[in-house]
Amino acid sequence: MTAPGPRPTLAVTVGEPAGIGPEIAIRAAWLLREQARCVLVGDAAYLAMTASLIDPAIRLSALSTMALRHSGLPHFGPTTIPVIDVPLDAHVVPGQLDANNGRAVLATLDLAIEGCQAGWFDAIVTAPLQKSTINDAGIAFSGHTEYLAEKTGTPKVVMMLAGALQAQSSEQEQPYLRVALATTHLPLKDVPAAITRETLDQVLDILHADLRNKFGIAAPRILVTGLNPHAGENGYLGREEIDTITPALQAAQARGIDARGPYPADTLFQPKYLQDADAVLAMYHDQGLPVLKHATFGRGVNITLGLPLIRTSVDHGTALDLAAQGLGLADSGSMEEAIRVALSMVRAQAST
């Protein structure tokens, strides 16, 4: 996805230190060092130790936050990965959470946001963190997405996952699937009430705008699922499609947004429909994401739309069980793709 050109600078937060985040961040940053200037944000000593165990050839160079704020980010060539040192407060035991490190984990995200606002970084790529660790440290925290929205003063954000699909033949261009969500982490019983005209208007506006401005798609085509089985079957299986979703789509079309539907979710995710779409808007988390995660073979990317900055992430969690077994078991594929997508978005945004 990434075109050749100057290396954008990406802040890569390493997430929960007891999970696989530090390993996959180091592996991905090193693998893609010719394409991106990835700046790791985490405990420099712990990352240096981890890097030496992964591959002694990996070179890290630590920089303090004080130096960064005083002089900005110095130049680093592709032979070295810079690390902004955010020291942990407790010794790390892989696989074992420690609330004493919760504030330091959150501080890495704060620094990445600060760096984007100050112009040090072009985008943020986040490794997975453990929400419970931060909450156990005494800080109310519901997730990356909500925290980024709060810190940047963004009233509404949209979660979208994306990933490359397997082409049907070697001659075909690899298709790409993007699935955005009208609602995110809600109990299923609360979803219908959360799908309102106002919500759908906001989500469709954000999705359309970011597909244009951050993905470089001049005229985005959006396919929208229904909420109920068979998209309500003309009201026999629910009226949300008639009363809420269809009027929202008609209003979006009047605003110049090419949003079509509502379509039954069980038949929409087929090549004959997706080949004409730039994104699918699903009504709830487990309606759209299981399809994407299955189809992208562990290389999906989580993207937060609506922010005044670019943020991508992996599509998986901290994998504490893998981390406890030692290095070398974690797959860095999703982190690699998150970096590639961030690069593509930075360049698309710069060209609009």
Image (spheres, rainbow, N blue to C red):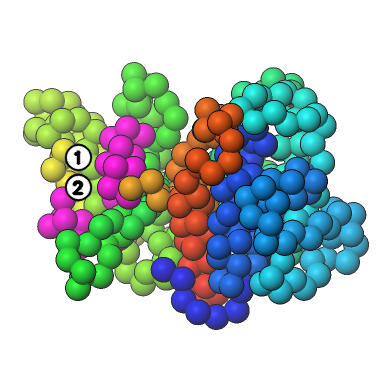
Q: Position of residue 288 (x, y in %)?
A: 30, 40
Residue beneath the point at 21% across and 69% down: 170
Q: Amino acid at mark 1?
A: Ala
Q: Nearer the viewer, residue 173 or 228?
A: 173
Badge 2 element:
loop
Disc 1 marks which residue?
265
Q: Is residue 22 magenta?
A: no
Residue 53 image point, x, y percent: 67, 47
Camera-side residue of 282 and 205: 282
Q: Residues within 10 Å of mark 2 (few under 14, many from 20)?
A: some
**Mark 1 surroundings within 10 Å by alpha-carbon count, few (fewer than 14), some (14 through 19), many (20 or more):** many
Disc 2 target residue: 269
Disc 2 marks a residue whose amino acid type is: Phe
Q: Which residues are magenta?
A: 269-296
Is the C-beta separation of discs 2 and 1 under 8 Å? yes
Q: Is residue 246 visible?
A: no
